[in-house]
Amino acid sequence: MSFYLGEKMWTDKQAKRFYNSKEWKAKRVEILTRDNFECQDCRTRLKEASKKGIQLRGKDRYIARGVEVHHIKDLKEYPQLRLDDDNLISLCTFCHNLRHGRTGKSFNQVKKEYISEEKW
C-alpha cells in the first residue's frame, strides 16, 4: 500500500493523471479479478432479496458484469486511499452511475452485460 497520510484534496487534473497511470490500470485489473468481474452492488441486491424472501424479476435476477472500479471514499477527497483494496469495488456501469447520482436522461445508459444468474 503506497499512500501518504495528510494529502490534500486532489484537483480534476490530478485525478485524471492518476486514472491514466500504469499504477491505477494494474490495480483496476487486480480489483476486477478479485471480484470475479461481477458487479458488487448487483450481488448485494440479490443477497438482500434472498434474505428477505423477495422474488426478483427480469433483469434484476442477474449479476451484471463488473467493468468499472469504484472508489468507495471519493478519490479527490481521499487520495491517500486511491490504491487501498478495501476502498475499491467492481461495479457495472449502471450501478456506478447510480453511486455517483447520474440517473435518468443525464447520461446514456449502457446495456447491462450479464455474467450469470445467481442461484442461492
Image: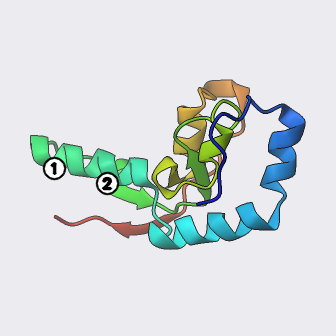
Answer above or below: position of 37 versus 69: below
Q: At x 65% / y 58%, what residue is drawn?
A: 2
Q: Amino acid at mark 2?
A: Arg
CA separation in Å, label 2 and label 1: 10 Å
Instruction: Give percent across and percent down for residue 59.
Output: 40, 51
Answer above or below: position of 19 versus 72: below
Q: At x 46% / y 70%, what residue is drawn?
A: 34
Q: Amino acid at mark 1?
A: Ser
Instruction: Give percent across and percent down for residue 66.
Output: 53, 60
Which residue lies under the disc numbered 1?
A: 50
Q: Check the picture and name the quadrant holding the C terminus.
A: bottom left
Q: Check the picture and name the quadrant holding the N terminus.
A: bottom right
Residue 109 shows in this picture:
no
Give the crowd class for mark 2: few <14, some 14-19, many >=20 residues within 10 Å. Answer: some
Residue 119 shows in this picture:
yes
Q: Quadrant of residue 15?
A: top right
Which one is nearer the viewer's eye here, 10 or 19?
Answer: 10
Q: On the picture, is 75 further left or further right than 85?
A: right
Q: On the picture, is 101 further left or further right than 34?
A: right
Which residue lies under the disc numbered 2?
A: 61
Give the crowd class for mark 1: few <14, some 14-19, many >=20 residues within 10 Å. Answer: some
Q: At x 28% / y 64%, what residue is drawn?
A: 118
How are the colours assigned in the image? rainbow
The answer to which of marks 2 and 1 sits earlier in the sequence is 1
Instruction: Give percent across and percent down for residue 76.
Output: 71, 33
**Given this view, does label 2 or label 1 mark the residue nearer the observer?**
1
Is disc 1 placed on a helix, strand or loop? Answer: helix
Instruction: Give percent across and percent down for residue 3.
Output: 65, 51
